[in-house]
Amino acid sequence: QVQLVQSGAEVKESGASVKVSCKASGYTFTSYGVSWVRQAPGQGLEWMGWISADSGNTNYAQKFQGRVTMTTDTPTSTAYMDLRSLRSDDTAVYFCARSIVMGGSHYFDPWGQGTLVTVSS
Amino acid sequence: SFELTQPPSVSVSPGQTARITCSGDALPKQYVSWYHQKPGQAPVLVIYKDTERPSGIPERFSGSNSGTTVTLTITGVQAEDEADYYCQSADSFGTYSVFGSGTKVTVL
């Protein structure tokens, strides 16, 4: 079955970087994109950006431009999200999701299990 | 910036119908998807392309679109439907995806 499995929880100090991985299985990795979404404690979902697993093209939310890099490794069907200059308000659960095009937008199915990133000040 | 507006909460008795709205200026141009999320779990897609239901999602979940407002309807609510529900779409150019603020559905 289609599945995304993410790396484990991370604890980082303020100013550091974190790299979260997302390994896909059960489908042709390069036929879809991968989006990253985060959720701060008790808050809603926030879209961070998208990467095409075929071309490597990316599209980042304005809020994260300059601080986030999304990459993929096709031989291992793995996507990565690298967030730099971490602040306490980056403490959140980070999700990856298979991104499927529908008209001019995307929908996300399925999702990874989430990775908790805690930033200590 | 593009925003999607949802009511913070909806309460419904078992067996009744719950309706959750999502409004935004770009909705006439872009499809909407809906997700539910239970505490400590990842979101799950329940509706895509405004009205389509993924395989495995019960028929009691349906979506509709009336221009700048889309609606997720749960007909015959069950206790297991208690969750947070999020709509999701994109800006007019399809550049950025965005989620609504979420609606907590409480089954009384």
Image (spheres, grey):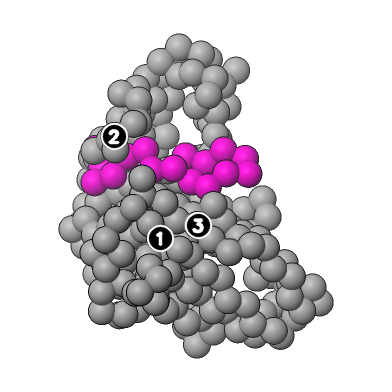
Disc 1 marks which amino acid? Ala
Density class for disc 3 (Cα within 10 Å; few <14, some 14-19, many ≥20) is: some
Determine whether the residue tagged by mark 1 lies in a helix, strand or loop.
strand
Density class for disc 1 (Cα within 10 Å; few <14, some 14-19, many ≥20) is: many
Determine whether the residue tagged by mark 3 lies in a helix, strand or loop.
strand
Which mark sits nearer the N-terminus, 1 or 3?
3
Density class for disc 2 (Cα within 10 Å; few <14, some 14-19, many ≥20) is: few
Disc 3 marks which amino acid? Val
Whether callout 3 and callout 2 share a subunit is answered: no
* Residue at mark 1: A24
Disc 2 marks which amino acid? Ser
Q: Which residue is drawn at 73% across and 75% down?
A: A12
Q: Distance between the residues labelled 1 and 3?
A: 7 Å
Question: Which numbered mark, 1 or 2, is in the foreground of this view?
Answer: 1
Q: Which residue is drawn at 39% across and 76% down?
A: A72
Any magenta on residue B1?
Answer: no
* Residue at mark 2: B55
Query: What percent of the width, then of the height, locates residue B92?
Result: 26, 65
* Residue at mark 3: A5
Looking at the rendered image, the quarter that the N terminus of chain A falls into is top left
Q: Which residue is drawn at 29% across and 34% down?
A: B55
Above or below residue A82? Residue A5 is above
Assign the magenta stretch its main secondary structure. loop
Any magenta on residue B40?
Answer: yes
Above or below residue B81? Residue A116 is below
The magenta-colored residue range is B36-51
Determine whether the residue tagged by mark 2 lies in a helix, strand or loop.
loop
| Nearer-the-camera pick, B13 or A17 | A17
| Nearer-the-camera pick, B90 or A56 | A56
